Image: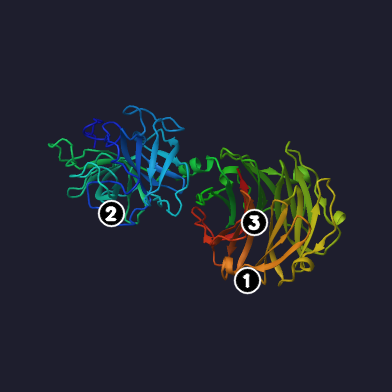
Amino acid sequence: MSALRPRAKRFTGLIVGATTVTAGLFSAGAAQAVSGPEATAGQYAATVKLTLGDEANSRGCTGTLIDSYWLATAASCFAATPGAQVPAGKPALKTTATLSNGTAVEVTELAPRTDRDLVLARLAAPATGIAGVKRAGAAPAAGVDLTAAGFGRTKTEWVPGKLHTGTFTTNATDATTLAITGKGTDVLCKGDTGGPLLNAKGELVGINSKSWQGGCLAADPAETRTGAVSVRTDDLGQWIDQVRTLAAGWKTETLVQAGNTLYQGIRLAGGDWTGFTDVQTKAGDIGGIRTAASAGINGDTHVVALANDGTLRHTIRKADGTWTNFGDIGAVAGVLGSVTQVSAVSIGTDLHVVVVANGKVFHTMRTGAGHWTSFGDLSTVAGPIGTVTAAATASAGGQLQVTTVTGGKAFHTIRNTAGQWSVWGNVAQAAGATGPITSVTTAGVGNDAHIVVATDNGTRQYHAIRNGSGTWEAFAELKDVLGTVTAKSVAAATVDGELQLAVTTADGRVLHTVRHVNRTWNTTGAVTLQGVTAAPGAITITGTL
């Protein structure tokens, strides 16, 4: 493809030499595409039509939804002049994305790559009900057939009303691009730039960038070549996730212990999930991790990990995506022996950590200034309750609430804003009896504390609320919410004023749901654990903004 030259009439298909459309031709209905067969209804639903500029002088491109808020397209669609670097931020021209369901949404932000003709564009509102395209993890081999889709011209139509597709063969691959050739008379035309290039599994392998446009309407009649260049996307998973996670909005930071380590992923504001990354590759190798706890403070995520050697370590994932190195909590708060579990929650800018060690419960606090208090034994301030096997923390009404499990029963105490602790109370006496409790999690929503427990060796799960008034709402079984599952670990957090619940199951899944302020629950869904290489064990979630 070295003979390709960036001449407006021969290629690019977009910005320079882009189609200029008169008012009314780009409606909010169905769009246009590749000079191949028309896509059937519902096919390639993640593909969107892009309109740049006003009705009197607009140009068209194609894009592909990565998730409900972000789409991928060609940076050249937004360039002021051919080859110019596209600045990050708001598009220079008003840009509208018309989704496959006919909804028109404005593009408010651009995040361009500097090494290839690619940009991520953020929508002003989520594309509800349309799944983002799956991304391939490797470039296609030479000779492999791929499918391109787009809303550009065809051989006979200037502004066709339907999405079209074409079949292309992979010729060659380099570090950033794919050289492809249309099969038969299939070709990429103007307006197809930015459209998806998909493998046989429907996974995104590239974004269409340049084409000879042989046979396209209004192209050079002497041009017969159907070759094109697409930019690779298979190697950009980490960059795409970074762009998505740095955008404004609530996020559910999720940490899953699996195998010998801890993996971090994020549920974004639109409900989409990033992949998962090994925390030890970011914050330092501490010889393996048994379990962990997390707490969000503003945009940062504090992680307390129990290392395989029994030490407690602390790291922070900053709002910009960088990590601090693991620090040894024992060196600043005191060394505890036989640690089995840890829980954490934020109150203001303070991090409260509760640890189960030697069957007892201990508390420490890291202030907003970064100073740690010494571990204190809760039995000395809230009373003895026997051998503790699990503990959970919540912030409700500015107070720290701690729930522990001993002898299969849950007990509850509160540390008020003055630092004073209440005597342990038996939760069963207030919220009703359950089977023997094996796992517990809590989260504060306003002044209320929500408690979720797994009982009977994890085979049953219940939810209760301690209201801010001090009254309790009885335990209710969650079978209608979670289905019939055996829970290994449960985790709850408050995110944007709502309760989120995550569960790892004995059959190797992570399930997630949301309880809204109107008391209804989302349909529980399984989280795709991309990047996690072993069966999930303990899980912790927290909200950040």
- Density class for disc 1 (Cα within 10 Å; few <14, some 14-19, many ≥20) is some
Residue holding disc 1: 459
Residue holding disc 3: 492
Residue 88 x %, y %: 45, 32
Which residue type carries mark 3?
A: Ala
Quadrant for the C terminus in the image: top right
Q: Nearer the viewer, mark 3 or mark 2?
A: 2
Residue 180's place in the image compared with 114, above or below, is below
Element carrying mark 2:
loop
Which residue type carries mark 2?
A: Ala
Which residue type carries mark 1?
A: Thr
As drawn, the residue found furthest toward the left would be: 222
Residue holding disc 2: 39
On screen, residue 128 versus residue 380, left or right, reads: left
Residue 389 x %, y %: 74, 63
Q: Which residue is located at x 49 percent, y 54 percent?
A: 530
Q: Nearer the viewer, mark 3 or mark 1?
A: 3
- Density class for disc 3 (Cα within 10 Å; few <14, some 14-19, many ≥20) is many
Mark 1–mark 2 Cα distance, whole angstroms, equals 46 Å
Residue 187 location, quadrant: top left
Which disc is residue 359 wearing? none
